[in-house]
Image (spheres, rainbow, N blue to C red):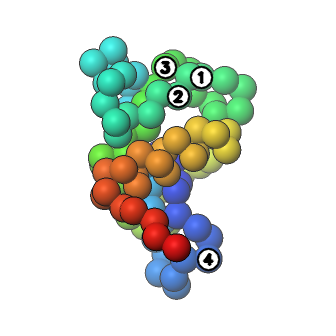
Amino acid sequence: MVIVSSNTLGKLPLKLVVPITDGKNSFINNLWHIEINPDANNGLTKKSVADALQTRSIDLKRFMQKLGNLSTEKLQQINTAIVNLIEYEYEN
């Protein structure tokens, strides 16, 4: 899972997360699947995807251990996928 919520969000012991799954070739063209290749920082051992379509809240008690970190660029891609899924348009 990738945590996408802010630490300053609310008082409930919840985090908004995006699950990570195997990176299948059929996922490549989906707007909501963000490809993540394994590297020394993220702790992954194989090509994976963050599945923004399955974004949900998880209780902090369910977190076991931190495996790694994603790059700022990859986090931005995941956040952009979520914004596109909900068809949010920012207006000044």
Q: Residue beneath label 1, please?
A: 38
The one of 11 and 70 positioned closer to us in this rendering: 70
- State if disc 4 and disc 3 touch (CB < 8 Å): no
Give the amino acid type for the residue marked by disc 2 in the picture.
Answer: Ile
The structure residue drawn at horizontal position 58% and vertical position 67%, both measured from the top left corner, is 6
Q: Are marks 2 and 1 in contact (CB under 8 Å)?
A: yes
Q: Where is residue 56 in the image (x, y as percent from the top left)?
A: 35, 59
**Crowd tier of the residue under label 3, counting other residues whose Cα lies within 10 Å: few below 14, some 14–19, many 20 or above:** some
Q: Is residue 39 above or below residue 85?
A: above
Between the residue at mark 2 and the residue at mark 4, the CA separation in whole angstroms equals: 26 Å
Q: Mark 2 points at which residue?
A: 36
Q: Where is residue 20 in the image (x, y as percent from the top left)?
A: 42, 37
- The residue positioned 33% from the left and 24% from the top of the image is 29
Q: How far apart are marks 1 and 4 (CA)?
A: 29 Å
Residue 91 point in image, percent of width and height: 46, 70
Q: Is residue 15 above or below residue 25?
A: below
- Quick one: SS at disc 4? loop
Pick whichever of labels 2 and 4 is earlier in the sequence: 4
From the image, tell me which residue sits under label 4: 8
Q: Are marks 1 and 4 in contact (CB under 8 Å)?
A: no
Q: Is mark 1 on a helix, strand or loop?
A: loop
Looking at this view, name the residue that lies furthest to the top.
Answer: 25
Asked whether residue 20 is in view, the answer is: no
Q: Marks 2 and 3: CB-CB under 8 Å?
A: yes
